[in-house]
Amino acid sequence: MHPQRLILHNELHARPSLYFDEPAHVFHLAFLVNDGQCDTLLSRCCPGPVDPDAAQGITELEGYALKWERHAEFLTLTLVVPSSSHEPCWSPPPKALMDRVEPFMQHVINAVQIVVRTDTSFSGDLSVYGFKDPSGSCIGGGDATVWSDFRLNDDGTNRFLFINKRLNAYRLGRMIRRLLEIETYRMMASLSLITAKALSTQLNVFDKTLVNLSERNAGPDTGNAKALLTDIANLSAQVVSSSAKTRHRFSATQAYAQLVFERLGELRESHVGDCQRLGIFIERRFKPTVRYCAVTEQRLEQLAESVANLGDLLQARVQVEMEEQNSEILNSLNARADTQIKIQRAVEGLSIIAITYYLLSLFKLFYSGLHVMGADISARDAMLAMTPLALCVLLFILIRIRKAKEH
């Protein structure tokens, strides 16, 4: 078998839920910690050794069921404390848990307490639980009811009231898990909101700079191409840097948001009384955050494309100018070549004239020498005899010049 078959197959059984019966108090904490802090926290909370490669585990803390889960960016602890229907509505987390997590409380990104009660013990009076304008839903096809006002109490905990009607321990554990995941993933998705707001301010500056650079590029002045290209390169570097810093956070927001909406769909909500449904409450207030982050990311991508297009336009403009300059240089070179050819032709003509003059002078000296030696040759006969020879010499010189030019 493939060496990874067992690991891949067991992913089907990864991250099981805690199964329990009501009444109970469920305490859930999510810590935004790194790997080293995660190992330290688990070693403080778990009585036995923890497998460093394990993604989750179920153990006991002071006799209470404790489940821990490692995620890509955070660690969750879920503690189930059995109770009775006559206990106070909201009780603080067990001291055993708080003592162990006290050094890491500054890393808590989400804290939820869910009070689980039976349908027979619930009087229907939500004011007893301190809710202000709560939202509520029938979930699981009407097998349970859950309420919350999504307001944090003094210790920063978000509270839910869960009334079980017909859920067994297995369905109850899975339904509680969905509620906890909705809140944790919602908070993790919202982490990029502050980043998006800061980036929006920076993008406004980038937009103004891009407009200024575009106007400079469209202007008639073509002598500032080098300075303009430098400014575009600086803006592009800043945009790429911002994109690299925020890409992971925005991608995580989209992934977490998708999980939130999937878990809301798995609740199978229906209305309970005149209360607004939990899913509607969360979607109406959570979707704007997700959309704002998505729009900010899209705006950054469009800005990067615009800067790249402006750089391409400037390069095309410079290329056209260079081609025009090269064309002018070529025309100048052609004109110079034509002038040189004309001068060369003039020099060749003058050279032929000079050669003819010297040749005739040489023949004249030859005729004078013959006349002195007593040869009886008239000037007319000497000219008739020397003319063909002179023409042959000139023809030979012209052929040699032409061959040299062709070579």
Image: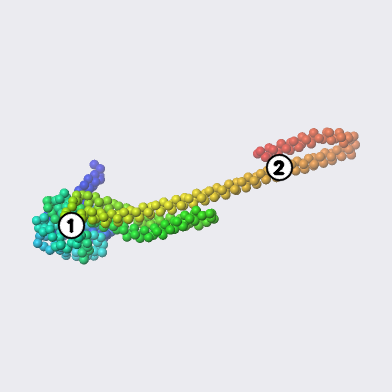
> Which element is circle 1 on?
strand
**Residue 25, placed above or below residue 372:** below
With 233 as the anchor, is 84 left or right in this view? left
> Which element is circle 2 on?
helix
Give the residue drawn at x 9%, y 62%. Answer: 86
Residue 225: where, in percent of width, then height? 51, 55
Q: Amino acid at mark 2?
A: Arg
Q: Quadrant of the C terminus?
A: top right
Q: Quadrant of the N terminus?
A: top left
Give the residue drawn at x 40%, y 56%. Answer: 239
The crowd level at tag 1 (other Cα within 10 Å; few <14, some 14-19, many 20+) is many
Residue beneath label 2, please?
A: 345
Label for residue 15? none
Residue 79: where, in percent of width, then height? 17, 58
Structural distance between the alpha carbons of marks 1 and 2? 105 Å
Residue 263: where, in percent of width, then height? 22, 51
The answer to whether residue 17 of the structure is visible from this angle is no
Count of labels shown?
2
Among the 4 quarters of the image, the one containing residue 58: bottom left
Which residue is at the front of the view, 133 or 322? 133
Label for residue 147? 1
Give the residue drawn at x 23%, y 54%. Answer: 280
First-in-chain label (1 vs 2): 1
With 337 as the anchor, is 272 left or right in this view? left
Q: Amino acid at mark 1?
A: Trp
Residue 131: where, in percent of width, then height? 18, 61
